[in-house]
Amino acid sequence: MLNSNSNIAVSSRSFCRSVELRTRLDNVFNDVKYNDQLEHFNEESLIKFFSDAEAVIVSEDKISKNVIDALPNLRILAKFGVGLDSIDIEYLKEKNIILGWNPGINAEAVAQLSLSYIILMLREAYPLNRKLINNEWAKIKESRDMSGLTIGIVGYGNVGKKLASYLKIFDTDVIAYDPFLQQDRALSEGVKLVSFDEILNYSDALSLHVPLNEDTKNLFGKKEINKMKKGSVLVNLSRGGVVQETALLEALESGHLSGAASDVFEHEPENTNIFHSTLLNNPNFFSTPHIAGTTNQTIQTLGENAIKSLTDHYQR
């Protein structure tokens, strides 16, 4: 389906920054267009960038019906990453466009960051750091180590399971909720499957690892956050739309939650590197710019899998 002269386009910024990945792709294809400006594309600019591409490698870009319809030559879409909520998968199938995707390959990176955020917020390390930056030598108020706490995992897939395995080294109770698992299903040793209300009521820290879809959109709204244990911590490394940001801010301002950490936001930048959220002004909110699944190691693995999605359909 593809050959050495096929038109290839890569929008993923992480892929485009990797000399090794670019070299590997250029060794197979003669006509590769890279996102050298590291743009955050919107729908219009993405269509322009992909133009006549037969195969594309995408990361967080929104691949809507409009985008797909505007790319009549597109035959293969390779995902640099694991989340598919930004892609109209059903329409890809309808148009007979091949989706290259390999879930779970960055689970370790996400789970490790989740663990670090849980500890960071439970120990009050981040709010105390902000005070120190402002020349205030403050002391702890409610700093907690992991011993004796209950850690909840919402979404027991590849990342959730890996996080649970890391938590086993601590003297904690690990509970999990997953809407796609039967309530009586046995999980890994030491992990108990509970109801949604139970995980809200009993968790000292909650880590979210679910895809964004109709069932999980605003899964954590005002009602659900208010049900969470007072003084608990919420960590979100899944998708921004899973948590209602106004409700989260309200819970932080009122003190109902002692802290929250997020790697994702509902409205992330398009066509700009500039970003703002009112959550960023809260001293008990720690955040990063959607980096959980990308380390030096995972970038290479994700890139290699994306390239393989193209070369699997290469004809000499």
Image (spheres, rainbow, N blue to C red):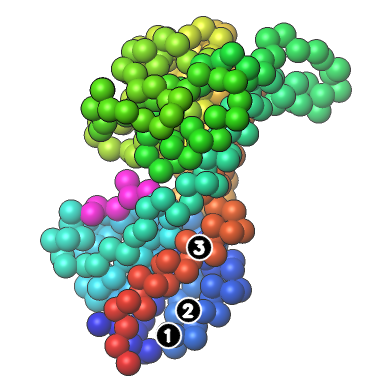
Q: Hey, which quadrant is residue 2 in on the image? A: bottom left
Q: Hey, which quadrant is residue 76 in on the image? A: bottom left
First to last magenta residue range:
83-89
**Which one is in front, 267 or 311?**
311
From where the camera sits, is residue 233 visible?
Answer: no
Question: Mark 1 and 3 residues: CB-CB less than 8 Å, in contact?
Answer: no
Local crowd at mark 3 within 10 Å, few (<14), some, or many (≥20)? some
Q: Position of residue 188 (x, y in %)?
A: 41, 32
Spatial distance from mark 2 to mark 1, Cα to Cα? 6 Å
- Which residue is disc 1 drawn over? 29
Residue found at the very far front of the displayed protein: 189
- Which residue is disc 2 drawn over? 25
Q: Secondary structure at mark 3?
A: helix
- Which residue is disc 3 drawn over? 301
Looking at the rendered image, the disc whose residue lies closer to the viewer, 3 or 2, is 3
Q: Position of residue 244 (x, y in %)?
A: 40, 25
Residue ID at (48%, 28%): 207
Residue ID at (48%, 55%): 40
Q: How many marks?
A: 3
Q: Hey, which quadrant is residue 200 in on the image? A: top left
> Could you tell which of marks 3 and 2 lies nearer the N-terminus?
2
- Give the residue type that dot 1 points to: Phe
- Give the residue type that dot 3 points to: Thr
Local crowd at mark 1 within 10 Å, few (<14), some, or many (≥20)? some
| Quadrant for the N terminus in the image | bottom left
| Quadrant for the C terminus in the image | bottom left
Q: Position of residue 214 (x, y in %)?
A: 24, 34
Residue ID at (52%, 43%): 110
Question: Mark 2 and 1 residues: CB-CB less than 8 Å, in contact?
Answer: yes
